[in-house]
Image: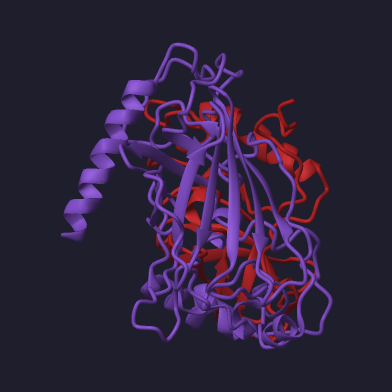
Chain colours: A red, B purple
Amino acid sequence: MRSRSVLVAVGVDGEGMTMNMRAHVFVPIVAGLLAMGAPLSAHHGDAAYAATPKEMKGCVVTEFSWMNPHSLIKFDYKTATGELQHWTMEIGSPPSMALLGWSRTTLRAGDVITAYVYQAKSGVAVGRTNKVILADGTVLADRDDSTPSRYGTTEAPK
Amino acid sequence: MRHALIGAMMALAAALVLSTVTAGQAARPQGAQAKSPWVYYPLDTIVGDGGPAPKRDLSGTWAGPGSTDAIPRGAAAERPSLTPLGQQVMSQRKPIGRFGPAGTNDPSARFCDPLGFPLNFIYQNRAMSVSAMPNRVVFLLQFGGFWREVWTDGRPLPAKVGGDDRDSLDPTYMGYSVGRWEDDYNFVIDTTGLDERTWVLRDGTPHSVMAHVQERWTRVDRNTMKVSMTIDDPKMFTRPFSLGTYYYRWVPNQKINEWLCVPSETLKYLQEQGDPAGSYPDAESQRPGGGGRGR
């Protein structure tokens, strides 16, 4: 399996690490995040999106744009009735998502993922990301500002 | 010419930064893996206060609000009390928090226009470098790659900016700034001459060109710095108000990453995601917590 660099941003160099080692470091962070129970992913203009995420399995990534203001993941999804849908969903900006373990090389065309998406109310196949599960089981989340600190104190110095 | 100036400023900033690194500014241990000096490690946060603050010195590279959650939270901006003119201008503003990317008329969100001062320090003050020259202090901002000059040679602020008089100066996105050390640890900056196309706050709060913003930068200790800002603009506000207090922490390896608003990327985002999602300005936000950080 090719190397992913999702751990670079959490202060662990991915070179030479096994997938188990990566999961050992990364999964607790995401698991902690999910355990908070806080709604994940949010930015401006949330009213345009559904309140609960839609689960889509077997999505095939067609494009991953690591860019500002928000990165985009494009994928193909085949519905239960066999309809092929072309989806676009956003995550945060590269610097923000790097804090959560994402990187420019997290996704590549052809990757198969499970996507959890807050779909646009307009009914088009776009949405905001709740989380993505990679083929190796790695969970990558988006998040919002209500998530408590995971990186250190937020107390102001006296 | 412009590139030469930027290069010179960056080189000076780098030299000053290197000269100010001390043993007191130890980074949090992050394991035995070697790190690249070319990489910004946002989770590699500084530990402790690093000892007493150096006197009359803000130079170095700093992580601000939003760069990591390790940055202490300060105070949010107060709500302005708008004059009738301020209310009239405000009524035309469609902030992204309510209208979303598809319906907003925020020029930074739609066109990558510069946030300008003070918004670049309120909304996107995630990281920056500060460098002192003999006659000015220069702020090199991560977001947008902008810089700002604060003159310390004793000149007064310009009296006329943006007017019809021939000697009236042009408004600028970062304004005209003068600074002085009030004491060894407090650097006070006064700014005016701000381009009226910029918004003071993300909600669309307007300002006039002769708005006066005052910043008080405090070097709390070697590893911590904070800024408190107020704005006075009788044309738009019935009284001065606080734009908030923001903390900065020393970046251990003094490297921050590039973070630009690229028009072609913004256009792609709007065409393929933001606009198709639509605008629902009168609907309740579906999920709490959005909008604060502006990712």
Q: Quadrant of residue A27?
A: top right
On screen, residue B55 versus residue A130, left or right, reads: left
Vertical placement of B102 versus B81: above or below?
below
Say which residue appears at 69% left-offset and 35% top-offset.
A150
Q: Quadrant of residue B217?
A: top right
Say which residue appears at 74% left-offset and 25% top-offset.
A158
Q: Quadrant of residue B134?
A: top left
The image shows residue B75 at horizontal and vertical percentages of: 75, 46
The image shows residue B236 at horizontal and vertical percentages of: 69, 76
Say which residue appears at 56% left-offset and 58% top-offset.
A113
Vertical placement of A71 versus B139: above or below?
below
Residue in the foreground of this view, choosing between B138 and B264:
B138
Residue in the foreground of this view, choosing between A9 and B14:
B14
Residue B194 shows in this picture: yes
Residue B143 shows in this picture: no
Vertical placement of B46 versus B200: above or below?
above
Vertical placement of B269 versus B219: above or below?
below
Q: Quadrant of the N terminus of chain A?
A: top left
On screen, residue B238 versus residue B267, left or right, reads: right
On screen, residue B84 versus residue B266, left or right, reads: right
The image shows residue B68 at horizontal and vertical percentages of: 59, 40
Say which residue appears at 56% left-offset and 15% top-offset.
B52
On screen, residue B180 versus residue B186, left or right, reads: left
Total marks in image: 0
The image shows residue A42 at horizontal and vertical percentages of: 70, 62
Residue in the foreground of this view, choosing between B7 and A88:
B7
